[in-house]
Image (tube, rainbow, N blue to C red):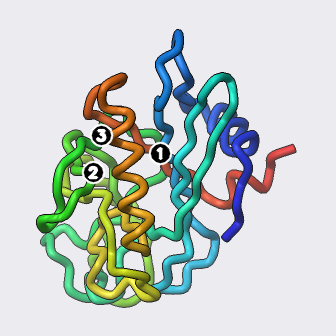
Amino acid sequence: MKGYTPNRLINTSTRKGYTIFSEVKGRPWNLNLIAVRSDDDTPETFDDELYVLWEDNAIWNCLNMRFTTDPGVYWLKHPMNKLGTAILIPGQYRGVFQKGFHKGKPALRQVKPMKYWRDNNKDSILDQTEFVDESIAHTNLHRAGIDSQLIGKWGAGCQVVARDSDMDLLMHLVGNALPFWGDKFSYTLLEEKDFNSYY
């Protein structure tokens, strides 16, 4: 994993015009959920990263997790939607996730529209198409298996944490944030190439 530092995440996000949520008057646990999509487009691999970044007493804390922002090959070849398989477009999506469940397990559930490319040619290659769909496509942020190595059927457009224990930790942090900030969470998707121009 790349293991970007809090400073690089903050500077890259703000340079792109995205908000970084910080501690406000002693209210901690203002979580930043920042995913970084890898330049490596090898299918089926958890080669992206999810960072959970928050400020506490003016100190930035950061955890990173093995992750995928891309659907698995099965769903690329067998789209669930007639428009094609959803591939989330990079950007910042404010208040888009809410604490809830995905297939009976604690997760962050999509409650506001996000923008997607729709890949409908049924091959194993991720295509950034001209067609953009903005919708609630139920692409939740959820867990895969105990320590999943391949995406398989875990991701049909969802944002997926590879390790069960990492998702448990994320939901623990979400629980810490709830009394201070409510149950809606923003999500930022960056690309690895966004960091190449960082100085």
Residue type of the residue flagged with mark 2: Leu
Q: What number of labels is visible?
A: 3
What residue sits right under mark 2 in the picture?
108
* Disc nearer the start of the sequence (1/2): 1
Marks 1 and 2 close (CB-CB < 8 Å): yes
Question: Disc 1 on helix, strand or loop?
Answer: strand
The type of residue carrying mark 3 is Val
Q: In this view, does 115 lie above or below 175?
A: below
Residue at 17% from the left image edge and 56% from the top image edge? 101
Q: Quadrant of the N terminus?
A: bottom right
* Nearer-the-camera pick, 81 or 162: 162
Circle 3 Cα neighbour tier, 10 Å, few/some/many (<14 / 14–19 / ≥20): some
Residue 85 in picture, x, y percent from top left: 27, 72
Q: Which of marks 3 and 2 is nearer the N terminus?
A: 3
Which residue was labeled with disc 1? Answer: 33
Numbered disc 3: secondary structure: strand
Q: For this view, does 131 lie left or right of residue 100?
A: right
Q: Where does the image place residue 132, in percent across and percent down from the top left?
A: 32, 54
Residue 29 lies left or right of residue 101; in this view the side is right
Where residue 105 sits, quadrant-wise, is: bottom left
- Comparing marks 3 and 2, which lies closer to the viewer? 2
Give residue 96's mark: 3
Query: Where is residue 173 drawn, in percent x and y?
Result: 41, 44
Q: Can you give x and y, in whole percent of width and height, for residue 91 in the image?
A: 48, 44
Instruction: Categorize mark 1 by other alpha carbons within 10 Å: few (<14), some (14-19), many (20+).
Output: many
Which residue occupies 13% across, 72% down?
Answer: 82
- Left or right: where 62 falls relative to 115: right
Q: What residue is rendered at 46% in x and 87% in y?
A: 149
Which of discs 3 and 1 lies nearer the camera? The answer is 1
